[in-house]
Amino acid sequence: MAVSSRKQPLYDQLVDALRDKIENDMDPGDLLPSERELTELYGVSRTTVRLALAELVTLGLVTRRHGKGTFVSELANSSADLTNAYSFTEEMRRLGRVPKTEVLEFGLVAAPKHVSAHLGVKLGAKVFRMRRLRMADGVPLMIERSYLPAQEFISLTRTDVETKPLYDIIEKDYQHKIRVAEEEFRASTARPDEAKYLRIAEGAPVLRLSRVTTNDRNVVVEYTHSAARADQFKYKIVHLRSQG
């Protein structure tokens, strides 16, 4: 494979080439060629190979074992199936990754028009607004803004959302039995502030997600909109054809 475009750093091109090979031609546990072999195969320097492999480690696609080589990660062909699990924490744990959440903002605000419409509360009603950065294995994956109706979560604190998964708070601390979480998504590009937190280039592809969560009393308990790194998530949707 030629690695020669002047518009993209060589190690980025090599990352793309190796990622394509890992995702399409290799299985978890497979051994990658050695640094020397990759240098000869792709016609690049040893430094370029090392930078590319370091990036693949950061992305969770490969693991390096001292004295043995570089292997395709068990997670390389896994994806976050966001249609079946509304909890980011639960989904990351299912994939064998270590989730972490950093709370960037938290406070009470008056609901603007679009928030009041999604939560089903009066315009200007008090709502909790929080902005959180979601990570797995130290890699930033998603930045999200969530709104909760204050009347349903009267004593909620920043400490609560810093130390517990949000859905544990909703279901265990406030006894809301979640009935459904409806989510929509669309392709987009990263805004400057999103790119900074997600450690991607401004304008890089992202998935924009919008979720409305309702309890068993048909009360909306959460409205969240997020930007997720497109290189870290993919959706799986199963369509069932009705009979008759």
Image (spheres, rainbow, N blue to C red):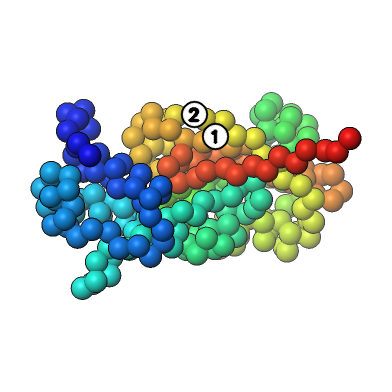
Q: Under tag 2, what secondary structure? A: strand
Please tell me which residue lies in front, 135 or 71: 71
Distance CA(mark 1)–CA(mark 2): 6 Å
Q: Hey, what amino acid is under mark 2? A: Ser
Q: Hey, what amino acid is under mark 1? A: Arg
Sort mark 1 into few (<14), some (14-19) or many (20+) by Cα contacts within 10 Å: many
Percent x, y of residue 20 = 35, 44
What residue appears at the point 41 percent right and 58 percent down from the top-left corner?
Answer: 27
What residue appears at the point 58 percent right and 57 percent down from the top-left corner?
Answer: 91
Residue 107 visible in rendering: no
Percent x, y of residue 11 = 21, 43
Please tell me which residue lies in front, 27 or 19: 27
Residue 187 visible in rendering: yes
Q: Which residue is mark 1?
A: 208
Q: Is residue 141 shown above or below 210?
A: below
* Horizontal side, residue 85 vs residue 57: left or right: right
Tags 1 and 2 touching, CB below 8 Å: yes
First reached walking from the N terminus: tag 1 or tag 2:
2
What residue appears at the point 78 percent right and 35 percent down from the top-left corner?
Answer: 120
Q: Which residue is mark 2?
A: 188
Percent x, y of residue 187 = 52, 30
Sort mark 2 into few (<14), some (14-19) or many (20+) by Cα contacts within 10 Å: some
Picture disc at residue 90? none
Figure quadrant of residue 124: top right
Percent x, y of residue 14 = 24, 43
Residue at the extreme right of the image, as rendered:
244
Image quarter (top left, top right, bottom left or bottom right) of the N terminus: top left
Image quarter (top left, top right, bottom left or bottom right) of the C terminus: top right
What residue appears at the point 13 percent right and 45 percent down from the top-left corner?
Answer: 44
Figure quadrant of residue 87: bottom right
